[in-house]
Amino acid sequence: MTAMLKGLPPILSPELLYLLAQMGHGDELVLADGNFPAVSLARRLVRADGHGVLPVLAATLQLFPLDQFVEQPVAVMRRVDQPEEAAPIWNDFQKQLDAAAGQPVCIERVERFAFYERAKQAFGVVATGETALYGNLILKKGVIEAETFSYD
């Protein structure tokens, strides 16, 4: 079932919307690829089977502010085979993140087992069907500034 509300990306399930709404400033969200051990690591798990990380990331960033008070509000899992090389999907992550933030976003590269430990502490994990290797990232939630809303 998808969220059928105006202005919400339909790829965001009610469960994922609820998870995002519960998160506070500084909480972290893992968007995980299909190989990630999401079930064994997640404190709170939301499934997004059949969707890749990129469309889930794009939809999430429409509602989710990145933390502006840390140098690297996003982390990826460093490659094991070539630790100094970027995984191909990271270029797409960077483009989406920069576009959503309106400025370049610094991405931290975290060693595999350190990434797993950080994922264990994350507020939630979204398990996608992403097939790209190293298609995992951690997003740190920022502050939503108060807006003046009128019911007139």
Image (tube, rainbow, N blue to C red):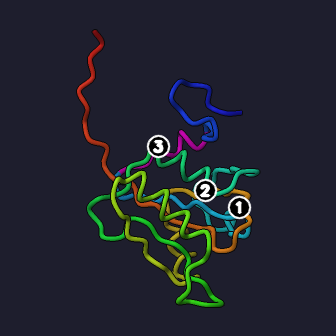
Task: Name which residue lies at 53% across and 24% down.
Answer: 6
What's under tag 2, amino acid-wise?
A: Leu
Residue 128 falls left or right of residue 22? right
- Which structural element holds mark 3? loop
Q: Where does label 2 land, which residue? A: 54
Q: Where does label 3 land, which residue? A: 62
Residue 38 falls left or right of residue 50? left
Residue 130 numbered mark, or none? 1
* Vertical position of residue 78 compared to residue 120: above or below: below
Q: Between marks 2 and 3, how big is the CA–CA gap?
A: 13 Å
> What segment is highlighted magenta in the picture?
15-24
The C terminus sits in image quarter: top left
- Which structural element holds mark 1? loop
Q: Position of residue 136 (x, y in %)?
A: 60, 67
Q: Quadrant of residue 52?
A: bottom right
- Asked if disc 1 and disc 2 are in contact, CB closer than 8 Å, the reply is yes
Instruction: Please tell me whether residue 67 belongs to the stretch shown in magenta.
Output: no
Q: Between marks 1 and 3, how big is the CA–CA gap?
A: 20 Å
Earlier in the chain: of badge 2 and badge 3, it is: 2
Dot 2 crowding, Cα within 10 Å, few <14, some 14–19, many 20+: some
Earlier in the chain: of badge 1 and badge 3, it is: 3
What's under tag 1, amino acid-wise?
A: Glu
Dot 3 crowding, Cα within 10 Å, few <14, some 14–19, many 20+: few
Q: Quadrant of residue 124?
A: bottom right
Task: Name which residue lies at 71% across and 51% down.
Answer: 51
What's under tag 3, amino acid-wise?
A: Gln
Q: Position of residue 26 (x, y in %)?
A: 36, 58
Q: Position of residue 90 (x, y in %)?
A: 55, 70
Task: Name which residue lies at 63% across and 57% down.
Answer: 53
* Vertical position of residue 81 compared to residue 40: above or below: below
* Dominant secondary structure (helix, strand or loop) of the stretch shown in magenta: helix
